Image (cartoon, rainbow, N blue to C red):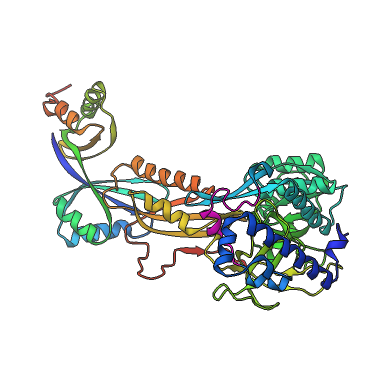
Amino acid sequence: MTIISQLSVFIENRAGRINEVTRILAESGINMSAFSLAESADFGILRMIVSDVEGARAALREAHFGVSVTEVICITCPNRAGAMHRVMEVLAREQIFIEYMYAFSEGETADVVIRPSDVARAAEILHSFDFGERE
Amino acid sequence: MIWNATKECMSAEDRRTMQGERLRRLVERVYHSVPFYRRRMQEMEVSPQDIRSIDDIVRLPFTTKQDLRDNYPYGLFAVPMSEIVRLHASSGTTGKPTVVGYTRADLAMWAEMTARCLTAFGIDRDDIVSVGYGYGLFTGGLGLHYGVEHLGGTVIPTSSGNTAKHIGLMHDFGATALACTPSYALYLADALRDCGMPRDEFRLRTGIFGAEPWTENMRREIEAKLGIDAYNIYGLSEIMGPGVSYECGSKNGSHICDDHFYPEIISPDTLEPLTHGEQGELVFTTLTKEGLPLLRYRTKDLCELDPTPCECGRTNVRMSRIVGRSDDMLIIRGVNMFPSQIESVILEMEEFEPHYLLIVDRVNNLDTLEVQVEVRDGFYSDEMNRMMELRRKIASRLHSVLGLAADIRLVEPGTIERSEGKAKRVFDKRKLN
């Protein structure tokens, strides 16, 4: 488990806006390892985990994007049934809400990005979290 | 029919004599009872003795909406509050509304002026009039209401806000006339078509429309869709409310009740009087009002005057349709508002950049107002709830200041044009000309 910085970009619902974000990151040589898009009728919020948060923030601001940086929790969990459920259960038991989350699996493991209501507390709980060998 | 032929059809000479006499008494009155006017006149070195005929009106000071605000709430009233029996107020710019006080005689005069209008529209004591203007601080509802009562007709105080109910009332009560804004009339026409009740179950034949500028095209559309005769009624709360001027059957300009409201057209730039037929800013002097008498009040409405007698027999001066404003006031769904009101709300909120764009349109015959704003750096959030909360917050503040719901559109930073000079902040897509 690690606390990492996530970059959020405000984008209007117009053609080519996401494309503009990815172009800027590409030109700055920044890699995007995970992302999710929250949408409403008029606008969306593109959330990303990138290789260089400060570099990406500066480049996007330069291009007049509304950007914010938030701390989120990234936990690597085994890619098998019930693993994610155990994380959710321990957070629920401690009264931690999930604002949103997204995950990417790759082979034996999955990287889960969690935006909890209380990052510090969630980090404390998940710090010593052990998935164990088998259910 | 003519309600008061003595006043509405008097000879030009008699009219001028009466106007001069009333002006003389008015000036005498405000000079002695309103410190604001006494000071203004002293500054201009004009005394009540200098006013001998209506032509001397040009020597008097102007009054603006700002003067009303500066003297909020009762500073320009010419009688003690014990004489005031009703207050109305117009929507507030940056918090302060303009307040109008009426004495018993003012209300009686208003009711008669409105009865003159209704009579010119062909409405009489056999008519049942549904008043769809809002009842409250706005003068539209109560103004029409007491006019219909004074005339002896039957008034349904429907007020605004519930279209289905309005249609039901008009149907069940056999309303023969409808009073509302012209844009609401068009909206109502579509609702009526879709309501399932056939047109011949309605007795509606006359429309009384005002509180916002409209066009001949809108008139044709309303008349065709609703199957009624549509008339313009003009007024403004500072002067009285609806009933300052009205159309007759010839529908060729609106007759001004100029035995009570003396009109002038001035150049908004030089403030010099313009001659008949020239387009300029309409100015009114309330010749007989007691509560809040105003000298040369600048309406900011642009139009022209025609003093030639009308084929209907009335001899009072007629004003053309309002073709625009000499300031940036917008009238949206009958509500007056200034871009500066929106600006003041945005400037007070640290969450937003001090730039905005207003887009006014007419969709399905109803005015819409979209406000585009940029969220300030540092207030962008990764959470959708927070962004929605920002939008809700500005929407509710704007609603309380404007008295009107606006659609808020959050746009990306830098998309609203920055300009050193006069930035174009308003795009009014409605076609009024």
Whether residue B220 is visible to the viewer of this picture, yes or no, is: no
* In the foreground, B343 or B404: B343
Q: In which quarter of the image is residue A70?
A: top left
Vertical side of B331 occupied by A2: above or below: above
Look at 23% across and 22% down and name the residue there.
A94
Q: In which quarter of the image is residue B282?
A: bottom right
Q: Is the magenta stretch mostly helix, strand or loop?
A: loop
Look at 81% across and 67% down and name the residue there.
B250
Residue B212, magenta (yes or no):
no
Look at 51% across and 49% down and name the residue there.
B96
Q: Quadrant of residue A30?
A: bottom left
Magenta segment, which residues?
B61-79
Vertical side of B46 occupied by A126: above or below: above
> Relative to A47, is B159 on the left or the right?
right
> Relative to A128, is B113 on the left or the right?
right
Vertical side of A76 occupied by B100: above or below: below
**Residue A19 in picture, x, y percent from top left:** 29, 59
**Residue B69 in picture, x, y percent from top left:** 53, 54
